[in-house]
Each structure stands twice: as C-alpha cells, then as structure tokens.
Image: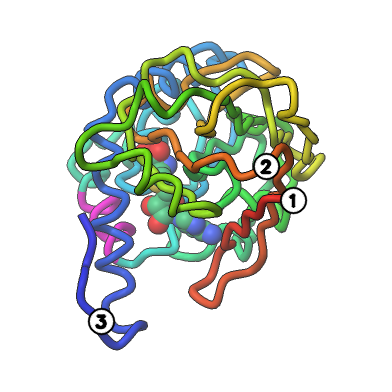
Amino acid sequence: MDILNHLSPRRFREVDDLLAFISIYDDTQRTRAFRKLLHAHQKQIRGAVCAEGGCGLGVFSTAMAKLGARRVYAVEQNPLLAKLARERIAELPKAVSQRIEVIETPLQEFRPPEKIEVLVHELYGQLLYDEDLWVLENLKIKPKLVLPDGGELLAGVVSSERYADNVVTITLLKSLGGVLIAGLFEEKLHELQFPVLRWQFGKKLLQTTHDLSGEKGDLLCFGVAITHRGRRLCEAGRCPNWSYVWTPRVSDRFAFEFRPSTRGGKDCHFRWIV
Ligand SMILES: C[S@@+](CC[C@H](N)C(=O)[O-])C[C@H]1O[C@@H](n2cnc3c(N)ncnc32)[C@H](O)[C@@H]1O
C-alpha cells in the first residue's frame, strides 16, 4: 500500500510509511524465521535488558518479554506505529506488558537509562541497505548481541527469454538499462548465484566485485538474504516481504552506492560500468 498522488511531503509521511510497511505481517515465513532466531537465543534473552529497533507493532518485543527478558525497550520512530504498539502491548497479560516500554524515537537517538544487552531489528531493504540498516552503524547503545547480525545481496544472471511475456517484452526490457525494478518477474528460486554486497554488524557494508564476463544471460536479478552468524534465516523470493529486483544486463560490471536521501535513509545509486 502506498499514497500515490503528490502531497505536501512531510504531512502524510508517517501514514505513507505505515501503509508501506504493514504488509510485512502477511509474511508468516519472515515472522517465523525471526521467532525461531529469538528462541535459539532464549538463554541470552532470559533476564536481560533487550531492545527492538524499529518495533512496528512490537511483535518481537512481545516475544522477548515472553522469553523472560527482564525489560524490553520497543523503539519506534513512527508515532502512528508507536501508538499502535503501545495499544497492543497494553492488551497483553500484565506480567508481560509491564516489562515492555515503547519509546518513540529514532533508534540512532535512543539513550536508555541502562545497558542494552540484546538488540533485535528488521531493517533490511530489497537491496539490503536501501532501507534502514545503516542506522545500526550510528547507535548510541552498544548491545552485546545483535539479532540478526548480517545480510547479503545476492545476484544472478539469467536469460530474459525464460521470463519475458507479452507485456514485459524483451524489447521493453532492453529499454530499461540501468533501472532496478522490484517484483518485475516471478522468482523461480534458482536464480541467485553470487553475493554482491555483504553487511555485518560492526563491520559496515562490504562491496564484493563480480565480473559477469563468464556468465551467460541478458537479465540480472538481485535478492536480499538475512543472515545470522553467516547462516541464512530468510531470503527474497521465499519470504514474500522481499521480492527480487531485476534489471537488463548492459555490460559485465556494475556498481552500487548508497547515499543519504533527501527523504531520510539511503538512496540506492546503481550504474553499469561500460
Ligand atoms: C520492516 S519494519 C519491522 C517492524 C518490526 N521490527 C517487525 O519486524 O515486525 C521496520 C520498522 O522500523 C521502523 N524504523 C525504521 N527506521 C527507524 C529508525 N531509525 N528508528 C526507529 N524506528 C525505525 C519503521 O517505522 C518500521 O516500523
């Protein structure tokens, strides 16, 4: 869901963000994978002071409180979501709700009165770093454990003949050189072959170079994978929250750059090197 017409940019920003992100809760695979990760770290969560960075409706804050966290700070910058989280948490049994505090602030400005031991977040964009992952490099807190702690942007080269149809024709595709299009084709789930970007908490974004000259195919696709300790938890295509991003191949080399956006966050700049 998105607001489509041009409006005074600031006025409806919060509603637009709310509508854009709320569909993540339709992605049960994503939610299940994150819950599983939390359960696997129950020992570290029980008795600990935890935070959820960008808590949305507070689903993982609630899960951590239920796993025995001593205190959970549910940090959310969008006032509409913070209000929804507060209302939902107030409906939980008191033994759980009284250990969760919703804090309405950007995560990068969050200064709790005590040390945060565990931080859970889900700030991954379709192109890994195009949403809010960069915030984790600008924290005022120093959690001992960050869940999840990594991610990859994977890519693959395929033949457009297997994907193009009567609407998105090969001719149309060829005219889209340099344009990254999310969800253009349905994923067949064998496309992603090699990493092009890697992110690891504390190590920033690592760009890997890949020369496509040995690869056959005129269509490139990208897909994000969420990792913890190098193991994949969920990925684009399998989790409907993230689709593949497609672009016609123009040469053998390309470059990604993420620069601060005028809307806040980072914009992705992609170019073919010819
Ligand atoms: C993809 S949603 C994840 C919500 C929730 N953690 C979950 O996984 O169910 C990202 C959330 O982070 C919030 N967010 C994004 N950047 C943030 C920031 N810098 N500080 C606080 N919240 C942020 C968004 O408003 C949104 O609610």
Mark 2 Cα within 10 Å, few/some/many (few <14, many 20+)? some
**Which of marks 1 and 2 precedes in the sequence?**
2
- When the figure is inspected, residue 157 is found, relative to residue 130, above or below; the finding is above
Q: Are marks 1 and 3 in contact (CB under 8 Å)?
A: no
| Amino acid type of the residue that numbered disc 1 sits on in the rendered structure | Ile
Q: Which mark is residue 251?
A: 2
Q: Which mark is residue 187?
A: none
| Amino acid type of the residue that numbered disc 2 sits on in the rendered structure | Ser
Q: Position of residue 223 (x, y in %)?
A: 51, 31
**Quarter of the image holding residue 103?**
bottom left
The region drawn magenta spans 80-87
Mark 3 Cα within 10 Å, few/some/many (few <14, many 20+)? few
Q: Is mark 2 within 8 Å of ligand 1?
A: no
Q: Which mark is residue 273?
A: 1
Secondary structure state at the residue bearing disc 2: loop
Q: Are marks 2 and 1 in contact (CB under 8 Å)?
A: yes
Q: For this view, does 92 lie left or right of residue 69? A: left
Q: Position of residue 34 (x, y in %)?
A: 44, 24
Residue located 72% across and 49% down the image = 255
Residue under pointer 3: 6
Q: Is mark 3 within 8 Å of ligand 1?
A: no
Mark 1 Cα within 10 Å, few/some/many (few <14, many 20+)? few
| Color scheme of the displayed model | rainbow
Q: Quadrant of the N terminus?
A: bottom left
**Which of marks 3 and 1 precedes in the sequence?**
3
Residue located 63% across and 61% down the image = 108
Label 3, label 2: how many angstroms apart (C-alpha)? 35 Å
Magenta span: predominant SS is helix
| Amino acid type of the residue that numbered disc 3 sits on in the rendered structure | His
